[in-house]
Image (cartoon, rainbow, N blue to C red):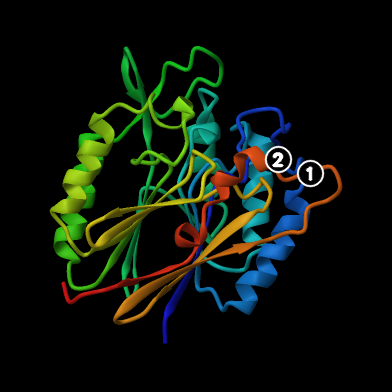
């Protein structure tokens, strides 16, 4: 038997389709995509869903409730990171905490779940400006908030990884730590060096961390770090609507990328950004798991 996890990210409920994107966004498409996702989860016998963040495009109460309602229809436990769009109002974070408490199946980051096959951790990014880190991202130019992680979060994860070191660990956080295969500086150059340096130093101390999952950049890509793999995944709201299915076995972790297409007329694939959906090596692989 294997533990099966579905990873989705950047569903951007309520997005107008004119904001940051790599491929065409299916505006209002989640009402159709979520039933397709539910069927895929049933067919693949998925045990757990991880959402990598940006569940909504604007962290206001109606969008938060609608997003959580949609995730509940998947009929599985959901672990969810908060992305920058999820917390783009001053009261967004508090709203998420209040409203999510009404949904038994949904757990927001920071959180840990232990399974026989592996441990799963989900973390939130904080966003720092000249006044320091806050759980808020300002949604308008000049975009002064930069992704970071707090010392207290590093200690929490370090303590858990030290305690639970007898099986593989999977960590999800919204913002990527690696360059993605693109020349667009918006995808990486604004990320302060301290953020990936801190995270990689932490993971290097714990070789049983095997997968690090991220979103934010709307790109499906793979970055090897020795025996650890860092994955980013294209936005679920953008064609071809990627979903990662992760299978954790005793000796290996397998990752396959599925598409929830087809897209309706007018939601066209952007050939110039074909790189954003990744090649076969980014979409499908098997990672051996050693005894840790």
Q: Name the residue nearer the viewer: 292 or 59.
A: 292
Q: Quadrant of residue 197?
A: top left
Residue at (72, 64) in percent of width and height: 36
Q: Do the residues labelled 2 and 1 touch (CB within 8 Å)?
A: yes
Neighbor class of circle 1 (other Cα within 10 Å; few <14, some 14-19, many 20+) is some
Q: Percent position (x, y) of residue 80?
A: 48, 51
Q: Percent position (x, y) of residue 14?
A: 71, 37
Residue matched to label 2 = 24
Q: Can residue 78 be seen in this view?
A: no
Q: Percent position (x, y) of residue 10?
A: 57, 44
Q: Can residue 220 be seen in this view?
A: yes
Residue at (30, 26) in percent of width and height: 192
Which quadrant, please, contains the N terminus? bottom left
- What is the secondary structure assignment of the residue under circle 1? loop
Height in image: 235 above or below 127?
below
Q: Name the residue nearer the viewer: 120 or 193.
A: 193
Q: In which quarter of the image is residue 103?
A: bottom right
- What is the secondary structure assignment of the residue under circle 2? loop
Residue matched to label 1 = 267
């Amino acid at each position: 038997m294997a533990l099966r996890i579905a990873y989705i990210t950047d569903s951007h409920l309520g997005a107008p389709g004119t904001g940051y994107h790599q491929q065409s966004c299916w505006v209002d498409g989640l009402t159709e995509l979520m039933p397709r996702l539910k069927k895929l989860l049933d067919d693949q016998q998925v045990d757990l869903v991880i959402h990598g963040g940006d569940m909504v495009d604007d962290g206001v109460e109606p969008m938060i409730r609608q997003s959580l309602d949609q995730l509940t229809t998947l009929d599985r436990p959901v672990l969810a990171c908060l992305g920058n769009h999820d917390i783009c109002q001053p009261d967004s974070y508090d709203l998420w905490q209040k409203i999510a408490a009404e949904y038994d199946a949904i757990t927001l980051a920071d959180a840990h779940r232990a399974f026989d096959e592996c441990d799963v951790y989900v973390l939130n990014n904080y966003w720092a400006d000249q006044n320091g880190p806050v759980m808020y991202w300002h949604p308008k130019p000049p975009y002064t908030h930069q992704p970071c992680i707090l010392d207290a979060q590093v200690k929490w994860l370090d303590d858990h990884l030290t305690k639970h070191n007898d099986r593989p660990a999977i960590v999800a956080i919204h913002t990527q730590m690696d360059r993605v295969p693109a020349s667009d500086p918006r995808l990486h150059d604004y990320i302060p060096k301290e953020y990936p340096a801190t995270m990689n130093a932490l993971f290097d101390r714990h070789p049983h961390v095997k997968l690090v999952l991220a979103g934010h950049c709307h790109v499906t890509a793979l970055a090897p770090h020795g025996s650890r793999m860092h994955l980013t995944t294209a936005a679920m709201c953008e064609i071809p609507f990627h979903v990662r299915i992760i299978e954790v076995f005793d000796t290996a972790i397998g990752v396959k990328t599925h598409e929830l297409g087809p897209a309706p007329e007018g939601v066209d694939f952007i050939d110039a950004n074909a790189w954003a959906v990744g090649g076969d090596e980014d979409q499908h692989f098997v990672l051996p798991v050693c005894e840790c």
